[in-house]
Amino acid sequence: MKVLLVSGNTAESPYPVYPLGLSIVARALRRKGHVVSLFDFLQQECSLDRLTERLKDFRPEAVGISIRNIDNVNLVHEQRYLDGVRAIVSTIRAVDPVPVVVGGCGFSLMPEQILAYVHADYGIQGEGEEAFDRLLQRLARGETPPERVIRTAPAMPGAEIGGADYDPDLLSFYLRKSRLIPIQTKRGCTRMCAYCTYPVLEGPQIRSRPAAEVVDEMESLLSGETKDGFFFVDSLFNDSRGTYRALVHEMDRRGICIPWTAFFAPSPELDDDIVARMKKTGLRSAELGADAMSDATLAALNKGFRFREVVATNELFRKHDIATAHFFMAGGPGETPETLEEGIQNVLGLRQTVNFFFLGIRLIPHTPLMRRALEEGAWSGDEDLLEPAYYLSPRIDRQRMHQRLVEAFADKPHCVFPPDKLDDKLQILCRLGLPLDESYRLLSRE
């Protein structure tokens, strides 16, 4: 079948991100014999007229739309994205009544509600490579699938998780904006953080792609003279099983030094040897998700580490001259005026880093935090979670938290609240060609 795959993402905070999931699905469909074309809504300046032109020129037999985010999870400055997807569906309907299928990590969080809201025909929850092909085959035979939401278990073995068909024009567009190419090395997460959706989306087991295959993909994408780099989009790079070490050792064995960055968890499992190897292979910056600022709130989020490990991990990266950025959420379970003050002092003690702060934690179905919100009466259970709802500790006043964070960091430029406060500056630095690590370094020194 002829399939148009549309990236519906319009978010640019903190920098635009290449639609990796869509490109992985494109590769899988092409290998099954489908003719696939990509349309990126952000690249096309969010123009519905351009989408209409592509539909008329390509004349697809089905359209797939990827939903990456449903909102920006920023209680202070909320932005919602589903109206844009609904407009895309409406535009498709006006041109040709072909089947419209939605999917992506954002869709998979609340599939029935989102499908009804955007008025698409079908939705795929979870991994879409094989499920989308099976759906297209049924549609090609003239069948009408009885289920509108097709659910897939996260069971694809790591060796079967393929790479992406990176579209050259699309890749060039995103490299101009962020200087980073996203790449996936594994799926799944063994951690059970109270608010997190990764175990729901990708399963609670680590499924790693073969290290040699990942490095082959990296080498095929970049020349030796490039200044661009990679962002490993795994839920966590330094997984507790240590599978990431095989990738680092493979890069080191081949003598590779390509700039890269990733998400890390504070952990004593990181040591001088592995961090030195990561630095040798090109690690330039690390994004760390401590999420809470005190031992009490870390425990309430089931993070599995204490704040001293946040400090130790930051110092380890600092020792190896690797730039860091930390992300924290104030107002989570167990937050009190006392833990907030303790947390502020803890964060101010972190050296040579940039820190981003969120107020409250976005509630997502099927997470322990949502159940806690119900039990505490912080959420009634009646509201539609398509409308952003946030957990805020009942033991501290929201306005007091907001004001205290503003006061605490007013003269601390490396502590950013609200988290989008420096978005414009970060995007400008990336567009000027400054790598992410240098951008973080500059922000941490201001």
Image (cartoon, helix red, strand yellow):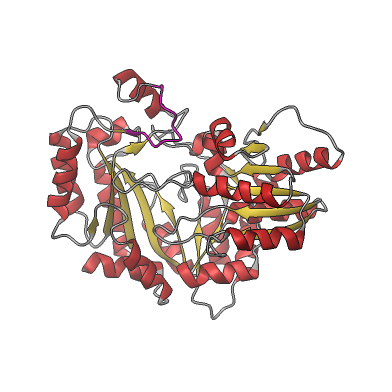
The spot of residue 425 in percent (x, y) is: 32, 67
Residue placed farthest to the top in the image?
375
Q: Nearer the viewer, residue 258 or 114?
A: 114
Asked if one can make out residue 242 in the rendered structure from this viewpoint, the answer is: no
Residue drawn at x 20%, y 36% is 398
Judge left or right: residue 230 versus residue 344: right
Residue segment shown in magenta: 381-390
As drawn, 11 above or below 438 = above
Above or below residue 268? Residue 116 is above
The C terminus sits in image quarter: bottom left
Instruction: Identify which residue, 146 or 436, lies in the foreground.
Output: 146
Horizontal side of 380 relative to 187 (left or right) equals: left
Tell me, yes or no, whether the highlighted magenta stretch contains residue 169. no
Q: Position of residue 343 (x, y in %)?
A: 19, 43
Q: Quadrant of residue 211?
A: bottom right
Judge left or right: residue 433 versus residue 5. left
